[in-house]
Image (spheres, grey):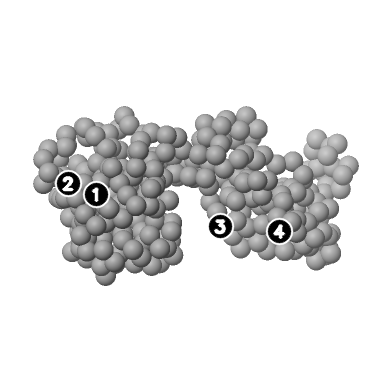
Amino acid sequence: MKLSSLLQEDLVLPDLAGKNGHEILAEMVDCLLRGGPVGTDRETILKTLMEREALGSTAAGRGVAFPHARIQGLKDLLVVLGISRKGIDFGAPDGLPVKIFALVLTSKTESTIYLRTLAAFAKLFSDEKNRERILSLQSGRRIIDFIASTGIMVKERLTAKDIMATDIVAVSPDDVVKTAIDRLFKYNLTGMPVIDGSGRVVGEITGRDIIKIGLPEYFSMMRNVSFLPDYEPFAKLLKDEGKILVRDVMHTEFVAVDEDASVIEIAYKMVNENVRRILVLRGGKLVGIIMRKDLIRKIIRA
């Protein structure tokens, strides 16, 4: 179904008056309740929304936020779209004021349509032209008509491209290990893909691969090295990190899925292949990465 079919004209607020997050959410909830009973009360909805925000802001950056919650007693999926013309501080990761709010609520027992709806809104607002156009419109009806014109659908299932991170940090096999260490440190990563000049993934390099540089191969045959208190494992690494190439220490085995792979396939691979990250490919080239934390943040605790 089209995303626009979930929107009602009286639940689109083109000029929110709230000056902070609580006021904005209260204004949107009050608008929702003016349409009639929804199966629970105002305070329960607001309390649950604020508890969700306390776990981490639902602001996605680029001036957009997706406040959402699953609430006991709600009868249906409920959606309110609001525009704050001046924007407010909503704890966005990029520090920008949030101007567009897509509020999505559903019952405690429903998750599928709820997650797919959030994914559809994320797709809509990922396009800068869509954001600019919606901010230029002054009525709920015109906003809904524009969203309908985009043709964005609420998908039947969530896939890799709905939850993957696209801000990829990678290295080349011809980079020196120092470059890899610096990027792992700078971006607080445990590992990253290695991509060649044609854009193909040829392996991964992880903290484990780097630490192994400092250990002689014969250590792998020893069950206990505590009797070697004076051995300094990182002397060689620190000395040669600017000379050793990534291709010489990376591992060439990695787990990847197509961008249309289902969430259940991704979860299965993470558990059964015991990996922290899964690479997402389109036509053999890397377009995103999914970490374990993405399943928790975007699915389990969405």
> What residue sits right under mark 2 in the picture?
32
Cβ–Cβ under 8 Å for marks 1 and 3: no
Residue of label 1: 80
Horizontal side, residue 285 vs residue 292: left or right: right
Looking at the image, residue 69 sits to the left or right of residue 285; the answer is left
In three-dimensional space, the C-alpha distance between marks 1 and 3, rounded to whole angstroms, equals 29 Å
The CA span between labels 2 and 1 is: 7 Å
Label located before the other in sequence (2 or 3): 2
Residue at 72% of width from left, 51% of height from top? 200
The amino acid marked with disc number 1 is Val
The number of numbered discs placed on residues in the rendered structure image is 4
Query: In terms of secondary structure, where does tag 4 sit?
Result: loop
Q: Going by the picture, which residue comes out furthest to the right? A: 218
| Closer to the camera in the image, 209 or 74 | 74
Q: CB atoms at circles 2 and 1 under 8 Å apart? A: yes
What is the three-letter code of the residue carrying label 2? Leu
- Residue 91 to residue 48: above or below: below
